[in-house]
């Protein structure tokens, strides 16, 4: 077979591999228009999917809930200045109220 000096130094398999690895600039419209599989894949990738959410209760710190003595109050045993204090939670209140005794003996800070 006949061959030029240039063709003797070139490996056609390596050239074919290099051609397949070359980036090609094409509009997405042309790629999607010529291949149903590519268009379907693009549509699947762009679809909104349901995201798994974590329930809020699973990320909140656990507290020691004390059963209410009166039936409808939420009581929490917590610490203030390293001393145990029972807090009563009023979910409808916009004020934080503290007894004078707890304020003087445990909190020991100015309160407005």
Image (spheres, rainbow, N blue to C red):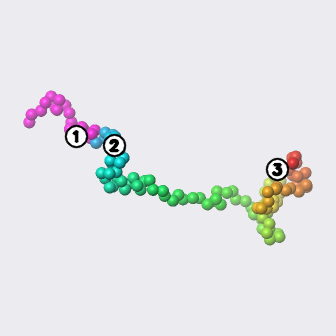
Label 1 close to label 3 by CB (< 8 Å): no
- Whole-angstrom CA distance, mark 2 to mark 3, is 68 Å
Q: Vertically, is 103 above or below 91?
A: above
- The chief SS type of the magenta part is helix
* Comparing labels 1 and 3, the label whose residue is closer to the camera: 1
- From this view, report whether residue 71 is shown above or below residue 89: below
Mark 3 nearby-residue class (10 Å; few <14, some 14–19, many ≥20)? few
Determine the secondary structure under disc 3: loop
Is residue 63 left or right of 27 when viewed as pictured? Answer: right
- On the image, the x and y values in percent for residue 85 come to 83, 57
| Mark identifier at residue 81 | 3
**Could you tell me if the residues under marks 2 and 3 are in contact, i.e. CB atoms within 8 Å?**
no
- Residue pointed to by mark 1: 13
Would residue 84 be seen by someone viewing this image from the given angle? no
Counting from the top left corner in percent of width and height, residue 56 is at 64, 59
Q: Earlier in the sequence, mark 2 or mark 3?
A: 2
The residue that disc 2 covers is 26
Numbered range of the magenta stretch: 1-19
Q: Disc 1 versus disc 3: distance between alpha carbons?
A: 78 Å
Mark 2 residue element:
loop
In front of the other: label 1 or label 2?
2
State how far apart marks 1 and 2 are (Cα).
25 Å
> What is the quadrant of residue 84 in the picture?
bottom right
Q: Position of residue 67 (x, y in %)?
A: 78, 68
Residue drawn at the location 61% of the way across and 60% of the way down: 55
Q: Mark 2 or mark 1, which is nearer the start of the sequence?
A: 1
């Amino acid at each position: 077979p006949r061959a030029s000096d240039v063709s003797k130094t070139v490996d056609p398999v390596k050239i074919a591999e290099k051609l397949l690895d070359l980036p090609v600039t094409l509009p997405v419209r042309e790629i999607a228009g010529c291949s149903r599989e590519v268009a379907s894949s693009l549509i699947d990738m762009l679809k909104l999917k349901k995201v798994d959410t974590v329930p809020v209760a699973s990320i909140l710190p656990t507290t020691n809930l004390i059963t209410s003595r009166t039936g409808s109050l939420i009581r929490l045993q917590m610490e203030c200045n390293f001393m145990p204090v029972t807090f009563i939670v009023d979910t409808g209140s916009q004020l934080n109220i503290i007894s004078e005794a707890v304020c003087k003996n445990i909190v020991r800070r100015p309160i407005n």
